[in-house]
Amino acid sequence: MGILEVKGVNKRFGGLQALGDVNLSVTENTCHAIIGPNGAGKSTLLNCLVGKLIPDSGSVMFDGQSVLGRKPFEINQMGISRVFQTPEIFADLSVLENVLIPCFAKRDGAFRMHAVEQVSSEAELRDMALHMLEDVNMADKRDHHAGTMSRGDKRRLEMAMCLVQKPKLLLLDEPTAGMARADTNNTIDLLKKIRDRRDITMCIIEHDMNVVFSMAERITVLAQGTPLVEDTPDNIKGHPKVREAYLGE
Ligand code: ADP
Ligand code: MG
């Protein structure tokens, strides 16, 4: 049993079958990539995992519990965090303030839900946020205005905002999209560092095959909303169906 088990998920947008009978099993503390051509349904699938979309049928189990019918914030509290295709940060706040927001949200959310849980002081939360910024190599930018940073810095900030919540599952939708080469390399290094700690499950959608093959232990290929094949990177590379559907050969 994987930490994430998707079974028979279907999603239609009007006449378009965006997801057709999708099965996906992700093993705890591994990195699993989802690849496929544009419009294959990759983002739709992630949206179904975080409660942004509700599948028409099928089941999504995370850590032994169904996520279906739960709101995005409830799913987040179950331990799923997501990095969006376009970085979603608070542009008018500083870098540090951006990381403090999920710290406060988690503390106060936990306080409401479990009154007995220890409540951290503001100083503790600040330490936690600063430590997180060090981890993503952004401590020197803590007072920078978040909205005017490079795409790569925004992405790293968004990751810090996710990671500071200590999620069990981190979902990444094209984390290097639109980035300059240097930013891409920094982002990959950071993702590998997180993966190698083996205390978080990662599910990554990515176009850059170098990233996919160097990051993932398992790869699922989606084509027209349906999984074509799921295998190790080495087997995926040589798979004739994949070369035909994805690499256009
Ligand atoms: P990918 O992320 O693999 O590029 P998407 O999941 O974004 O693909 O989209 C899959 C298909 O569903 C595409 O044909 C897209 O146009 C369509 N689609 C996605 N979201 C919506 C929506 N909210 N309403 C209508 N069609 C959508
Ligand atoms: Mg997409």
Image (cartoon, rainbow, N blue to C red):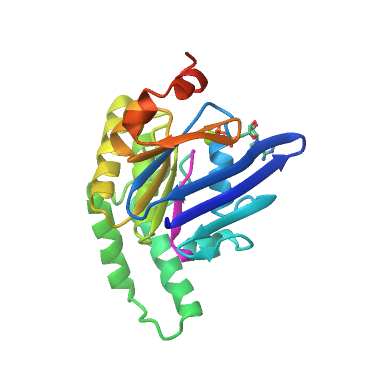
Residue 83 part of the magenta-drawn span: yes
142 above or below 151? below
Q: Residue furthest right?
A: 15
Magenta residues, start to end = 78-85
- Give residue 22's position: percent from left, percent from top: 58, 43
Number of numbered discs overlaid on the protein picture: 0
Q: Is residue 225 left or right of residue 155?
A: right
Residue placed at 27% from the left, 53% from the top?
133
Q: Is residue 137 left or right of residue 95?
A: left
Q: Nearer the viewer, residue 170 or 161?
A: 170
- Give residue 153's position: percent from left, percent from top: 34, 40
Q: Is residue 235 visible?
A: yes
- Give residue 111's position: percent from left, percent from top: 45, 78
Residue placed at 23% from the left, 46% from the top?
193
Q: Nearer the viewer, residue 50 or 181?
A: 50
Quadrant of picture, ligand 1:
top right
52 above or below 67? above
Q: Residue furthest top?
A: 249
